[in-house]
Image (cartoon, rainbow, N blue to C red):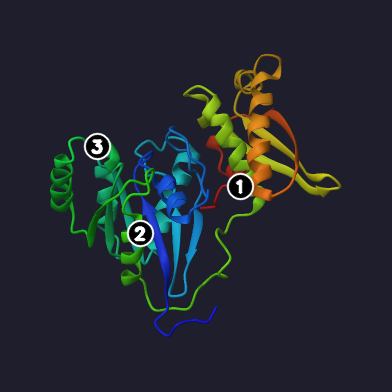
Amino acid sequence: MSIADDYRCGLVAVIGRPNVGKSTFINAVMGRKVSIVTAKPQTTRHRILAVHTTKKQQIIFVDTPGLHRKSAKAMNRLMNRTASNALADADLVLFVSDATYWTAEDDDVLKRLKSCKAPVIALLNKTDKVHPKEKLLDGLQLMSARFDFAEIVPVSAAKHDNLDHLLKMIPEFLPESPPLFPEDMKTDRSDEFHVAEIIREKLTLMLHQEMPYGLTVQVERMVQEEKGIGINAVIWVERDSQKGIAVGKNGSVLKKVGRSARLEIAELLGQAVHLELWVKVKTNWADNENDLINLGYEAP
């Protein structure tokens, strides 16, 4: 790819409280799944780069964990720190909020943005759920009064509404720079990372409300075999009682999760997959920074 003289490239941090659609937005603009998505808060736990490259610009979206108030456990503190670090490095910030309602946690995120040196674009997401449409104008006026945003853009990540307009706008805020990543690179994360996240997504979708926060997934082995890829992964939980829930009666949960994950992983890797899952207990892993780092969470 020949680089234009006025080529632009920069980091765009996608920030917001949990569950406002940050990962859905990034997957939509990328046209592929970069981050897992569920209806449960704290689904995104890691900083994930999504690289959107054209002939004139490279936009490096930084998907971050939702900034939240409760930081009792080490994992929550680590997630908040990860999101804050992304803010410090950003050339541009996209602040995502839900067009249908505003919360105290949205206010908390906005307070953090006041010390941010980068320009901030507000994304009013989920506009497809605003009825009647006249209410959207009220939402835009309220957002304008809350902060000195560079722009306020109504979008629906789920419906892909207004995303093209946003993508044309973003390069104006990025520095002139050659691309930082190869043009065919879509994310900085490895296949092993995405495999672990797909398994965690399937578990989160299947299990009841409290359980997903006490589990994580680690790929221990991923090798090319004669008839496809062989993968061994461990599902770590915090207590023995959680192990029974994750396995299910006669292994029912593990079988369903394994089947669903295997199909998506095979599509991701473009070949047959042999997936073996185990559930193991690591007491209080989510409140131990050493355990978290060993399990692939970002070091402070």
Nearest to the eye among marks 1 and 2: give it: 2
Quarter of the picture holding the N terminus: bottom right
Name the residue that disc number 2 marks: 164
Residue at 69% from the left image edge and 35% from the top image edge: 234
Crowding at dot 3, Cα within 10 Å, few <14 / some 14-19 / many 20+, comes out as: some
Name the residue that disc number 1 marks: 194
Q: Is residue 181 above or below residue 282?
A: below
- Which quarter of the picture shows residue 249? top right
CA–CA distance in space, label 2 to label 3: 22 Å
Name the residue that disc number 3 marks: 100
* SS type, badge 1: helix
Image mark count: 3
- The earlier-in-sequence mark between 1 and 2 is 2
Q: Amino acid at mark 3?
A: Thr
Residue at 50% from the left image edge and 74% from the top image edge: 179
CA–CA distance in space, label 1 to label 2: 26 Å
Residue at 60% from the left image edge and 19% from the top image edge: 245
In the shown orientation, is residue 97 left or right of residue 136? Answer: right
In the shown orientation, is residue 148 left or right of residue 126? Answer: left
Where does the image place residue 52, in percent across and percent down from the top left? 47, 63
**Labels 2 & 3 near each other (Cβ < 8 A):** no
Q: Amino acid at mark 2?
A: Asp
